[in-house]
Image: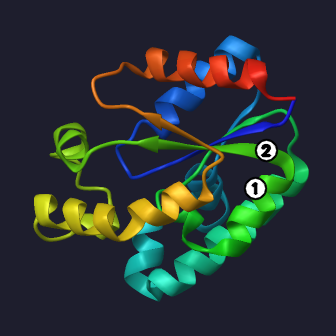
Amino acid sequence: MKNIVLSGMMGSGKTTVASCLAQAYGLDKVDTDEEIVKEHGPISKIFEEYGEEAFRNIESAVTAKIAKEHWGAVISLGGGCVLRAENVRALRESGCIFYLRTSPEEIIKRISGDKTRPLLKGGLEERVRTISAARSAIYEGAADYIVDTDGLTPREVAEKIMSIMRKVK
């Protein structure tokens, strides 16, 4: 089985859906953000001390390693991981990329009160709308499949992905 790769905005449910899929299939779950934290410390600290570009370089190195070392896993990506074509290429070689498309309104509901996300410093609603508008075409272009998540539970999103995966060879 190919890797199942979940992409999308922060708050789209990637981590939770990855857990549902890993449990349903009995697969390993790998989260790029968790791997970055294990190897380099808190993401917010990387952003503060070195900036977004340095973080993206670390993210690319970790993504390449994960894509190369895992087969038949569920991989949850950081929200900006697919911004770099090199990351998308590496992930496509071993997996199917699913974009968990979530409206800005739904994201705002899900993540309001979360102070751990470095890209959301400032006005939450404005930042979510701006980031979503800037990235939606990139997410769509990187995806093999798009799953709309608004109004669905993580389990329902996982079931949609499992239905698609049954058809993938």
Mark 2 and mark 1 residues within 8 Å of each other at the beta carbon: yes
Which quadrant of the figure contains the C terminus? top right
Determine if residue 162 is in view: yes
Frontmost residue, 120 versus 162: 162
Query: To which residue does mark 1 refer?
Result: 91
User: Percent position (x, y) of residue 161?
Assistant: 60, 25
User: Percent position (x, y) of residue 111?
Assistant: 24, 44
Determine if residue 41 is in view: no
Question: Does 8 sit left or right of 115 as displayed?
Answer: right
User: Disc 2 residue type?
Assistant: Gly
Question: Does 166 sit left or right of 72 as displayed?
Answer: left
Which residue is rendered at x = 66% and y = 24% of the image?
164
User: Percent position (x, y) of residue 76?
Assistant: 60, 44
The disc at residue 95 is 2
Which residue is rendered at x = 78% and y = 34% of the image?
73
User: Which image quadrant for residue 24?
Assistant: top right
- Tell me the SS state at disc 1: helix
User: Does 141 sit above or below residue 8?
Assistant: below
Which residue is rendered at x = 63% and y = 80% of the image?
57
Which residue is rendered at x = 46% and y = 50% of the image?
8
Report the number of numbered marks. 2
User: Disc 1 residue type?
Assistant: Leu
Label 2 to label 1: alpha-carbon separation: 6 Å
